[in-house]
Amino acid sequence: MSATPSLASPTAAALPRRVLHVETGRHLYGGAQQVVHLVTGLAERGIESLLVCAQGSDIGRALASIAQVHELPLRGDLDWRLASRLSAIVRTQRPDLVHLHSRRGADLFGGLAARYGRLPVVLSRRVDTPEARWLVPLKYRLFDRVVAISHGIERVLASAGVPHAKLRCVPSGIDPAPYRQPVDRGWLCREFGLSPEDQIIGHVAQFIPRKGHSVLLDAVERLRGSLPRLRVLLFGRGPLETTLQSEIVSRNLQEFVRLVGFRTDLPRVIPGLDLVVHPALAEGLGVALIQAAAAGVALVGTRAGGIPEIVRDGENGLLVSPGSASELADAIERLLGDKALRQELGRRGQALVDREFTHDAMVNGNLAVYRELLAERLARRGASAA
């Protein structure tokens, strides 16, 4: 697979002055959080950002002080008016390039607007869900570069026909420091009504089918006899919330599993957990896993998408087959029964994050893609002038 260009290369001379970002997610889930981190990092490097987002979105409020925010009415994949609205912003604001961070029509219409404005355009892909084979060659010709947040996504895109020359891999990143604060187990137990003797597992994800919540409930049913102090906290929100609550009641798991909502204090919460699990059926990478690894918490994930790139089997966690409740239960039981192993996996996870998954690495990786594109544009202009 193609590698991200080095910042030490000749392309480093081509710096953007301003970048137009398009992120249509309404809530600060993992992908939108990465856009916040990227825009913040670019500002620290003297690069101005414009943001197009949905009206009333969390990301618009989060970036209002450091980016020029344009809130638009967004009506999904078939909202053709988005192309003309983006074209107007491109025409009046004159960014150096356009970076599209989400789908829901933003990729197609954003690509069209950038092409109409004759600007380089970058698309970030954060999910490994395959697209229709007939659509790939039509849509992806709009983008000069496609940035995958994991090699797993990069492989899916390449197998679908996206040219290797367009693909770059830039993993998501976090600031590890907030997750290194002292563990306050007493606060955690009081906050969620737990006992010090409880074995506490966290699952941080939207309540949508591919995140594997039902598989986790199956595993808890298998473990309730052998691990009577097991307590599972499900962090997040989403369309399956009511369904999950009903399923917990129907399985009589209220003592073991709780839905605790979307939390903005995860740097305080995660370090106090005994284990973080992510039984996703499909996943681009999993920012919550990076956060947990930064906190020194052992992980259990699935061999799906980019998860094995952050959950290294035997290094900082254990991997199981997607959809296998029995393997998930076995991995949970093994780690909850071996504190020394959990601690060792946690230490290695912290070292892994420091090496590969920091804010700076993510910002610099995207900036390298920008520089590469702008250098190519300058070279083309020079060749045409000659």
Image: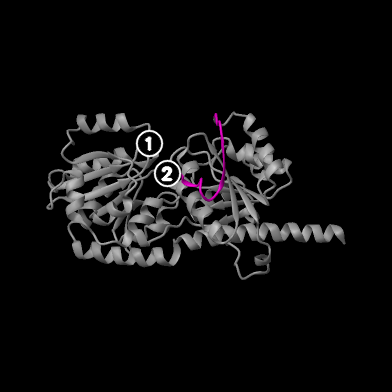
Q: Residue furthest right?
A: 386
Residue occupied by mark 2: 29
Q: Residue at the spot x=34%, y=52% of the render?
A: 301
Write the start and end of the magenta stretch as one range.
Answer: 62-75
Name the amino acid, label 2.
Answer: Tyr
| Residue 361 appears left or right of 195 | right
- In the figure, 272 relative to 210: above or below? below
* Separation (CA) of disc 1 from disc 2: 16 Å
Asked whether 307 or 63 is in front, the reply is: 63
Q: Position of residue 228 (x, y in %)?
A: 12, 46
| Magenta-colored stretch includes residue 156 | no
Residue occupied by mark 1: 209
| Magenta-colored stretch includes residue 63 | yes
Q: Position of residue 285 (x, y in %)?
A: 44, 51
Name the amino acid, label 1.
Answer: Pro
Q: Residue at the spot x=49%, y=62% of the render?
A: 360
Kindly identify which numbered label has been placed on residue 321: none
- Label 1 element class: helix
